[in-house]
Amino acid sequence: MTDQAVDAYDPLASVGGAADRPQPRIRLAAPVMGDEEMDAVREVLASGILTNGPATRRFEAAMAQRHGTEFAVAMANGTVGLAAMYLAAGIGPGDEVIVPSLTFIGTATAVCHVGATPVFADILPDTFTLDPSDVVRRITDRTRAIVPVHYAGQAADLASLRRIADDAGVALLEDAAQAHGATYRDRPVGSWGDSAMFSFTPTKNITTGEGAVITTDDEKTAHDLRLLRNHGMSKQYHHEILGYNWRITEMQAAIGAVQLGRLDGILATKRANAVVLDDLLAKVPGAVSPVAAEDRDHPYLFYTVLVPADRREDVAAALDDARIEHRRYFPPIHRQPIFSHMDDPVLPVTEDVFSRAVSVPFHSKLSHADLADIAAAIAAGLS
């Protein structure tokens, strides 16, 4: 391959915008890393065990304890974690899985990866999570699972969705990719569904670079997940099922265990900062801060502000001028080209929220001055 061919395609550049654009002054994400993570990686490297070893088991045990489940199984990344969770639930060709459209595309494409069909349901206008009443309308005799996504980490209405799933005889599988440490009615997210997937990409509150963990109380599910991630092997060169190489590395797992110890401090900082930014934006006409439901602990993975749809681009331009990074979490999946062959599901709340949404930086390293700058830029876009 020539240098010219290499330079011709850079998918990250298409995500990040023009290469000549000034670098943001306030970034969307800023992982909290220190000497503890470096020491943990050095310890793994010195051990000579780089995959499927004691660091992975420690990380899994810590995740299970933190989220109140019997088992936790680590995976290479969130997308394969979702696929493994779907496979372990027996989902495959001919089946339907109900998902929201306002989420990262992996929630739905992992359904396709196992041969099933995603069915898009609408969201609630306050928490941006699955609308239980719309979920009921979309259940058919082919439905095998309901997959709530905890938007920005705030739990979906898990009690209602659990009841709906049980009544329909289908699985409740949580996409908890954004929800480390969140609770719903004083019970950890990740313990309400038949299983749940947590992701650890760098935009998350805690990160291993890549990686995921699936939590469950079901012993067979945990067993099947371990087989799926390691070529279907129950013992060396004894392959019981069709499996994959979906293992996390020991280095990632070691980092994850350290990161998990940082989680409470990160969440406390972000919740305090949410109060500050909420107060600042309360003075900005046209800006609507995220809703934090009373029966849930919101981990504020990101902070999505709603503004009038006809002013959204003005707000985006003002943030650009202030060199404050921002995104639209998330472009509705049902409008993506790969799903253009499907019937239009008609999701008015999803469409409305996306037309007004702007997600601003909200990592735990932000100062009060940074928060004031973010609010000022939003105000400038709406003035």
Image (tube, rainbow, N blue to C red):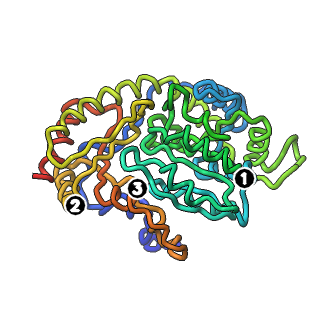
Is 110 situated left or right of 344 in this image? right
At label 3, which amino acid type do we have?
Answer: Phe
Q: Nearer the viewer, residue 318 or 128?
A: 128
Q: Is residue 25 visible?
A: yes
Quick one: SS at disc 2?
helix
Which of the 4 quarters of the picture holds residue 46?
top right
Return the residue at label 3. Answer: 330
| Three-letter code, disc 2 | Glu
- Say few, some or many: other residues with alpha carbon within 10 Å of mark 1 (under 14 / 14 to 19 / 20 or more): many
SS category of the residue bearing label 3: loop
Indicate the quadrant where residue 27 lies: top left
Q: CA distance from mark 1 to mark 2?
A: 41 Å
Whichever of labels 2 and 3 marks the residue nearer the N terminus, that label is: 2
Asked whether, in this view, residue 248 is left or right of residue 316, the answer is right
As displayed, is residue 277 above or below residue 262? below
346 relative to 352 in the view: left or right: right
The mark that comes first in sequence, 1 or 3, is 1
Mark 2 → mark 3, Cα distance in angstroms: 16 Å
Mark nearer the N terminus (1 vs 2): 1
Callout 1 secondary element? helix
User: Disc 1 and disc 3: Cα gap in Å?
Assistant: 26 Å
Residue 38 seen in the figure? no
Residue position marked by numbered label 2 in the rendering: 313
Give the residue at mark 1. Answer: 87
Q: Give x and y (percent) for residue 21.
A: 25, 59
Amino acid type, label 1 = Leu
Residue ID at (12%, 49%): 380
Residue lying at the far right in this picture: please name it: 238
- In the image, what residue occupies the spot 59% across and 47% down? 77
